[in-house]
Image: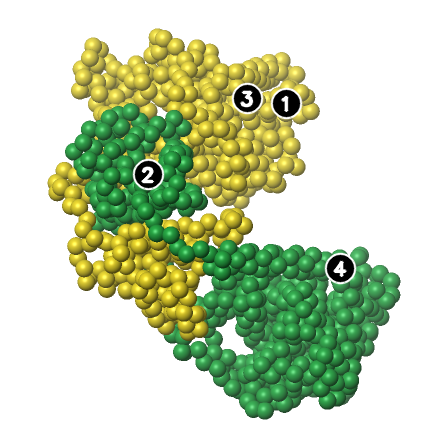
Chain colours: A green, B yellow
Amino acid sequence: MLGTLKRILVGKPLANEQLAHERIPKRTALAVFSSDALSSVAYATEAILIALMFANREALGLATPIAAGITLLLIIVSFSYTQTINAYPNGGGSYIVSRENLGTLPSLIAAVSLMTSYILTVAVSISAGVTAITSALPELDQHRTAIALILIALLSLVNLRGLKESGALFAVPTYLFIVSMFAMILVGLYRYSTGTLIPAPPPEIVHAEFNQTLGWFLILRAFASGCTALTGIEAISDGVQAFKQPQARNAATTLTIMAVILSLMFIGITILASLYNVVPDGAAEPETVNSQLARAIFGGSSVFYYIIQAATMMILILASNTAYADFPRLSYFLAIDRFLPRQFAQRGDRLVFSNGVLFLGIVSAILVVAFNAREQALLPLYALGVFAAFTLSQYGMVQRWRRLKTAGWIRNMTINAVGASITALVFVVIAVTKFNQGAWSVLLIIPVVVFLLYQIRTHYLDVANQLSLAEAAAPVALRRHTVVVLVSGVHRGVIPALQYGLSLTNDNIRALYIDLDASSTAKMKEKWTQWGSGVELEILPSPYRSLIRPIREYLHGIESRYHDDVVTVVLPEFIPNRWWQNFLHNQTALAIKTMLLFSKNVVVVSVPYHLDK
Amino acid sequence: MLGTLKRILVGKPLANEQLAHERIPKRTALAVFSSDALSSVAYATEAILIALMFANREALGLATPIAAGITLLLIIVSFSYTQTINAYPNGGGSYIVSRENLGTLPSLIAAVSLMTSYILTVAVSISAGVTAITSALPELDQHRTAIALILIALLSLVNLRGLKESGALFAVPTYLFIVSMFAMILVGLYRYSTGTLIPAPPPEIVHAEFNQTLGWFLILRAFASGCTALTGIEAISDGVQAFKQPQARNAATTLTIMAVILSLMFIGITILASLYNVVPDGAAEPETVNSQLARAIFGGSSVFYYIIQAATMMILILASNTAYADFPRLSYFLAIDRFLPRQFAQRGDRLVFSNGVLFLGIVSAILVVAFNAREQALLPLYALGVFAAFTLSQYGMVQRWRRLKTAGWIRNMTINAVGASITALVFVVIAVTKFNQGAWSVLLIIPVVVFLLYQIRTHYLDVANQLSLAEAAAPVALRRHTVVVLVSGVHRGVIPALQYGLSLTNDNIRALYIDLDASSTAKMKEKWTQWGSGVELEILPSPYRSLIRPIREYLHGIESRYHDDVVTVVLPEFIPNRWWQNFLHNQTALAIKTMLLFSKNVVVVSVPYHLDK
């Protein structure tokens, strides 16, 4: 029954040889790998404005210079990453790069940072996608968590089925988003300069908690908030393999194009927000800054407004989907290296790493519920992991140049060193300025999870050592069986078990019965003379009504008597015809089997007896 | 670890002979058996007033005549039940009486009615107990569901440990409640008659949904609401065994005393509510009618007020505890008769029917959550089951007199017939007037559960027939084994399994390996020549990466080749040292064992290999 449900939802199993690799041209690759990075313009400007609102109205004017600073950072990091692309044409994720150049601990920190940021990519992007919907349709705001959970469930399902990264699927929403954002920016600037749209007066900021003094801390916090614009720019360096030849050059070109588009959109939207005096909506059903802009520029009932909101929602869903590709792949690498349970390394029926997909879906759903699908509340947790991974990856590149000393290594090393230093500095800024807003939890989780990963690896190594045949002696043949048949009464289910036991040994066999009440025991004895095939019946008392304890003690007794043989416990099990009938029977056989698995030197034999109805 | 937790919470297991029976005197028995019945005065008057409030202010004057009618009903039913006590000195619950005199179907209807009303006893009494607390401390109202759940958890735990129905434990709160209620009634009447307490003016009833025409329907609904006062009066007839000799006479006397006390308290409180113009509080944090009365009569900050609220809460908790004694006992009877899963017939470590206790706790907790621990919202579901059981029990007595024709049978039969007819009529009144308020759900659940009980019994009879040896042939000895050792690699865990397989047969054995990837398979083949003890290794392809499917198909092939022997599948299992380590390994062995249990003619042998760390 469960099998049928799974078949319908997930689809038929695929054979190993159906695992396919596709090579895609630059224009498609831009769509596939950039949705995560580009979509961050849906919330990054708003995050800066929210941080500045804690000061005063004039502080909002700082948004554009801060966005310019972040754009500079973006260009430096992108430039630094083009070198990773050239150095790792097979895909240079932060885990791979830092494992190769920095060692195990840094690579695990990078891996855990990435895992937290992939989880947050899903939670943030889906929540922001929902806000894009509810900005246009505020009456849906009360159902925002439910909508977000449905989207996560659908994404998980699609990825369990295995999504071909098909060009068209990604290209349409991504290019639609890019075109509509640029259209908004250009029309907005045009209407402002020609005076056909008069901005609303600057808003009064009345919130009691506001009016903090504008100092370096607030400015840095606004900067840190805006750094979420950089999330996702590492995606291309992970996926160089998917590009057409010459891979590295195509990938680097695509990264550059993406950085330019992202910079222009981000700066453009921030300037527009300043010009039009748009501030984040503090209402119970908030409208995004982008939605307010689009509404002002195109009119809230125009078709353009709805296209912009729909394109925003779609690119944000695509951005989450990127995490669905990256997280399972990263957890696969970690599982192969034995830092994660091996279940993460198995391909499911549809050749995807199903357990990674499910884990990502469940954890991001928990985050969405905990934060009521409000992306601005989730953002303080987000950028930290991303910048930790940036720093480790680029510092790994520095070490690589120093080691390999290839042509031009000093120049290359300098570029990466500048990138690493700046991202490290930004990491510290985010950690300090966002600490109280939730960044502390990420700073706590990363070392705890790294510790767990080490524990997991230790366990796997212990098991491998214990199972190793390196120092094993030659196997010794077993001499004789001591057979114990457990019987709960005399019925058809017991007969085959008894015959099975007799086929193992003729002399060293006994049946074991637990005396739970006197009248049943008397009946049992009487019937045994007829059906017992001459096997001796031992009856154990059980004053505490436990079946497990007397059996364990009895077996312990046998075990200490004979030393060189094997004790075989034969367990008759009758198997109901339908699964729900199991609830009507004690799961005694299961309990006994579980207990015996943990008893040393005992082998358990299940002899099933199948019921027909 | 779980075992230790259970030991701490539930206590050490008790031996069978520690099952004790206690005989208690009348004054203690009154406390033990009457808490359920007496505690209903905590909500019954209020229920009448709530129903009347749907009409108008004048309608509230009908509360006293309605309460008088209910008191009459109470006297008739009690009188009728004294006959059951005499006829069934070993305890005459509705299920027993109707099974003996009316047949299976009526007895099951009685049983299910009782089960629903026991569950509701817990939900209603605990909720009413919480309201008694929150009437005194309104700031706790927001935590009412949590408080109710904690109380249910504590009651369940106490009953899992096994509560001796110790006299003192019950006597103190019960007598405190009786004394404080009578004190409130007498002082209230005295102050009214002497004019030292002027009642508040009659309240304005402003609710829009009110102002319905006062007709027979509303009056009957108010009557039906008040019938919750009768819940619990059957308890003494269930527990005659616990009385001192002469049992029947002592029990009947106790029942009469209880009926008199209950009648006086119920009528007294209803009269007081009318005199003082107290109406149910429609506020968000409602105060009970009794609390309003006590506050008016003694003053809200007096110690008497707090004693009354505390005594009310305690007797309500004792009332729930009665259900914890009755429900598991009834489900035990049903399980013995095979209408419920046999797990309900087993005594747990502490000699109590633990599964019944847990089931009652869980279901009543669900009800409490669903109804936010508001007893007045639960009451419409409550009386229906109680009156169905009353009717069937008394009608059973009618049939009994007709069959046995003992001395005075016509008089006795008439008494029970009058009782049965009246309770049947009240059942119809409740079903009709409360239908829309939730009684429909009880009318739906009773037949559905009765149907399920029949299905359960059919299954048990089917199993008994299929396991019966009545027509079984003499057992046939097994001739030879076909042994298949499943191997996932060559390691220490495999060696003992292989030796075990070789001890079963020397010639008809093979090892089975599933080819999941080519390189592991090549390594496997190489190592097998050294460690395989000469056993043939068969390698099965698995293009869909499934372990289960190729094994199942292979075994199916073997099975169809040989017909007269047994196929033994030997499964090496390595057992981690700590429970959490199981999460780091595929539960492949468990999955394979489960699959093989459902394959016919296959016997599974688990050969465990224990890891040390």
Letter of the chain that mark 1 sits on in the rendering: B
Regarding mark 4 in the picture, which secondary structure is present there?
helix
Left or right: where B412 falls relative to B442 = left
Please tell me whether mark 2 or mark 3 is closer to you in this view: 2
Label 2 amino acid?
Pro
Q: Earlier in the sequence, mark 1 or mark 2?
A: 1
**Picture coordinates of residue B130, whole percent (x, y):** 56, 33
In the rendered image, the quadrant that contains the N terminus of chain A is: bottom left
Q: Is residue A529 above or below residue A50?
A: above
**Picture coordinates of residue B119, whole percent (x, y):** 42, 34
Q: Are marks 2 and 4 on the same chain?
A: no
Q: Is residue A57 visible?
A: no
Mark 4 lies on residue: A435
Mark 3 lies on residue: B272
- Gap in angstroms between the C-alphas marked 3 and 1: 16 Å
Crowd band around label 2 with a 10 angstrom C-alpha radius: few (<14), some (14–19), many (20+): many
* Occupied quadrant, residue A530: top left
**Picture coordinates of residue B322, whole percent (x, y):** 44, 26
Instruction: Write the residue at 39% across / 24% down.
Output: B16
Please tell me whether mark 4 or mark 1 is closer to you in this view: 4
Mark 1 lies on residue: B305
Please tell me whether mark 3 or mark 4 is closer to you in this view: 4
